[in-house]
Amino acid sequence: DKHPKWVEILDAKTKDKLCFLDKVEPNATIGEIKSMFHKSHPQWYPARQSIRLDPKGKSLKDEDVLQHLPVGTTATFYFRDLGAQISWVTVFLTEYTGPLVIYLMFYFRVPFIYASKYDFTTSKHWVVHLACMCHSFHYVKRLLETLFVHRFSHGTMPLRNIFKNCTYYWGFAAWMAYYINHPLYTPPIYGEQQIRLALIIFLFCQIGNFSIHIALRNLRPPGSKTRKIPYPTKNPFTWIFLLVSCPNYTYELGSWLGFTLMTQCLPVAFFTLVGFVQMTVWAKGKHRSYLKEFRDYPPLRSPILPFIL
């Protein structure tokens, strides 16, 4: 019987023995081993643990089974502490609630933002009110999707990420809101036509983005981590899958281009540009992993912009 019965866990940096588990079932998963390790070291809950076969190797997945790993009767694993973790849902809720509240503070011109004579006054330009509705709609949509639509393949992320992400989202929201709701703000050059066109682009892309999120959710049954190639569905907004690997980012970019056109505000344009660069990085990574994972991946697709990028 060559199945492992003993598991020893060493510190990946110092090689000190941290834990020895005996009589471990051959069909035990790495997730179960993490739980056993947690019992002897309560400070390292499973989400904090990276368990690997080699000190410098990649982390094993929770669903990896002991007897399918290249180990002898005694399995030696290396442990690294991933640091304090926080759930993705918490991160997203914090990230997206901030911009919603911050923008509204500027919109209602709460005291100490602009000169005191403007406290709680409202703008005479209808585009300012429209922009507030669109911005609020976008973040309410994101919050609802986080709660009811998205399925996260990783339960947690490092706690330090929340500070970085919130600085980005909250900071940009304040910067944009300051100028759009400023008493001296002037509407776009081409007036109503520009605003109407921008609104159509914005709403079209918001519906598109939502449609893609639903299509991606339906690809993964609840509780599973299986990955499949996303294909267009009966919903016309998903037909862009024929040409793009990550159309959720394509639509997200379109939404912010619409918002930039609507407000004709430089900080919004800058936020759109920075977001586009970041989403392109994510889209290229996702596109690469699709190509690596699926031999029959549709060859026509680009990561984020059809035929271009």
Image (cartoon, rainbow, N blue to C red):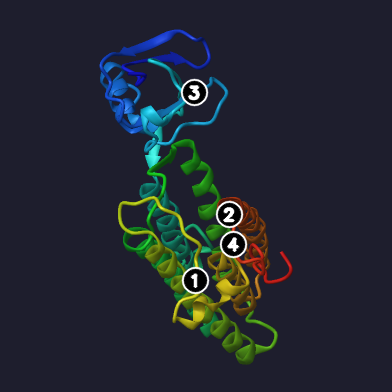
**CB within 8 Å, label 2 to label 3:** no
Q: Amino acid at mark 3?
A: Leu
Q: Is residue 221 left or right of residue 257?
A: left
Separation of marks 3 and 4 at Cα, in angstroms: 31 Å
**Secondary element type, mark 2:** helix
**Secondary element type, mark 4:** loop
In the figure, residue 255 lies in which quadrant?
bottom right
* Label 2 vs 3, first from the N-terminus: 3
Closest to the camera, between mark 4 and mark 1, is 4
Q: Amino acid at mark 2?
A: Lys
Closest to the camera, between mark 2 and mark 1, is 2
Give me the residue at 30% from left, 57% from top.
222
- Residue 18 percent across, percent down from the top left: 38, 11
The disc at residue 209 is: 1
Separation of marks 1 and 3 at Cα, in angstroms: 40 Å
Residue picked out by circle 4: 297
Closest to the camera, between mark 1 and mark 3, is 3
**Secondary element type, mark 1:** helix
Separation of marks 2 and 4 at Cα, in angstroms: 12 Å
Give me the residue at 35% from left, 24% from top.
44
